[in-house]
Image: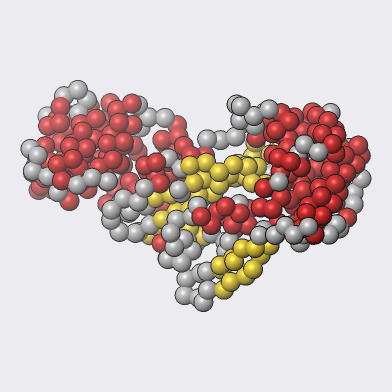
Amino acid sequence: MHAPRSPSLLRALRAFCLGAFFELGRELESGADLPISLAEHTSPNRPTLYEYRPLVGAFVEARADRLGRREDALQALAALKDEPAAGIFARAHAGEKTSEDEALRRTVLVPLLVRTAEACGGFDWEDSAFERAYAELERSLFGATRAYGAVVPLVGLSAGGTIELGPGLRVRHAATNELQAGWPEAQRLLPRDFGREVDRTLVLELETELEGTACVVPDAPVVVGRAITVLRLVTAGAIAAGPVVFERLDWRPYDVRPAPPLAAQVPPGEPTRIDPFRARLVAQLVERLAAGVDADVHEALDRWELALFHAGPVRADELREALESLLGFDEGPWAAAMRAAVLLGENGRERDELRLALRALLDGDGPGARAEEAVRRSLVETLLHDSRPGLIAALDEVLLGVRPRAGTITGRVVAAG
C-alpha cells in the first residue's frame, strides 16, 4: 500500500472496520441470515442467465445505525473531522437536515465498510481489501476535484451506439447490471422490462467535474427533464425517463432522486430511434434551454408536453394555448396560426394547408395530426431562432408582403421526420 496522506485517519478507519467485521461475523455465527439475491443477466436476443449474490452491502446497511454509534466509529468520526477535506466531502452529500456526523457516517464510514466487506465476500478480514478501499477513499477526500455522474434509464428510445447530446450529456447503452451493482435497490426502481426490450436498453448519463472545495452538485432531475422534453420534441417519440435518477460522486453511490413527474410518464405513441443527425438538433435545443428562454416559451413547452398525455378537446386546448404562447405575442391565437403557417410553409400551397389545419385546431374541431405536427415544429424553429421577437417581426413583414420569406435551414427541419 502507498504511504497514506493521514496515518492517524488510516488507523482510526481500520479499527472501525475491524470492529464492525467482528460484530457482524459474530452475528452471522449466532444464526443471522445473510440475504441472497438472484441477479438476472439479460440482453436482447440472448438467453437469460441467473447468478446468486450475497447482499453483503444490504446486510451492513440494515445495521448501519448501530455500527455508526460504536466507540470505534465515534473515534473514526473524530479523526475524520480533523481532516478539512472530509468536511468538504461530507457537506457535498449532506442535506439541509443532516448533521455533519450523520453525513460522515453515510458518506465515509458505512461505504468504506461496505466496499471492504464486498471485496472480502463477507466478513472474513483481508488486509488487501481494506487497503484498496481506503486508497480509493483517500483519493476522493484529498483530490482537487470531484467526479459527479447521474444515470437515468430511458424508455421508448433506441440507438445504434452512444449519442452525444452536449458537454457531459449523452445517451448510451446500459452495461449489464450496472445500476444494480451500485445501488442494490435499483432492481425494483427500474422501468418494467428494462434491459429486455430494444427500446428499454438505453440510459441518459450526465457527467461533470466539480471543483473540490466548493463541490456544488448539479440539479440532475432538472437536466433530465429538459433533455426528455427536447428528445420528445425532436423525435416525436413516446419517450420517458426514470422513474428515478441514480447519482454518484467520485464513483460512489451518492443519491437516488425522483425524475420530474412529466418526464417519468410514458406518453401514448410509438417508440423511436435517435441518430447522430437528430442528436445534433437535440444538443442545440438542450443548450438553448439551459441558457434560458422567456416565460412564454416555457409556457408553450409545458402546454405542448401536457398535450401529449391528453386526447380530444383537452389535447386541442393545450396545443392551442401552446401555439398562442409561442407566436401570439399578445395578438391572439389567430395571429399565432398565421405566423406558424408562414414559418413552416415552403410555398403558398403548404402555407394555405397549414392555415386550414390550424384553423380547425382554433375552432375546436380537434387537434388533427397536421396541426399537432405544426405546433411541434413551430417550437423547434422558434427555439433555434436567436430572438423570438425578431422572428415574429420578420414573419409579420412576410405576411404584409414587405419582405420575402427566408428559406428554412435544413438542420432545423430534421424534426419533421
Examine the rendered structure and indicate whether residue 140 appears above or below residue 178. Answer: above
Residue sitting at x 34%, y 59%: 271
Left or right for 173, reference 367: right
Expressed as whole percent of the image width and height from the top left, the position of residue 216 reads 62, 31
Query: Quick check: can you spot residue 333?
Result: yes
Residue sitting at x 18%, y 40%: 314
Left or right for 267, reference 48: left
Residue sitting at x 25%, y 42%: 307
Expressed as whole percent of the image width and height from the top left, the position of residue 368 reads 14, 49
Query: Quick check: can you spot residue 10?
Result: no
Examine the rendered structure and indicate whether residue 121 appears above or below residue 62. Answer: below
Q: Nearer the viewer, residue 221 or 212?
A: 221
Expressed as whole percent of the image width and height from the top left, the position of residue 334 reads 12, 32
Q: Nearer the viewer, residue 72 or 50?
A: 72
Expressed as whole percent of the image width and height from the top left, the position of residue 85 reads 77, 32
Q: Image quadrant for the C terminus?
A: bottom left
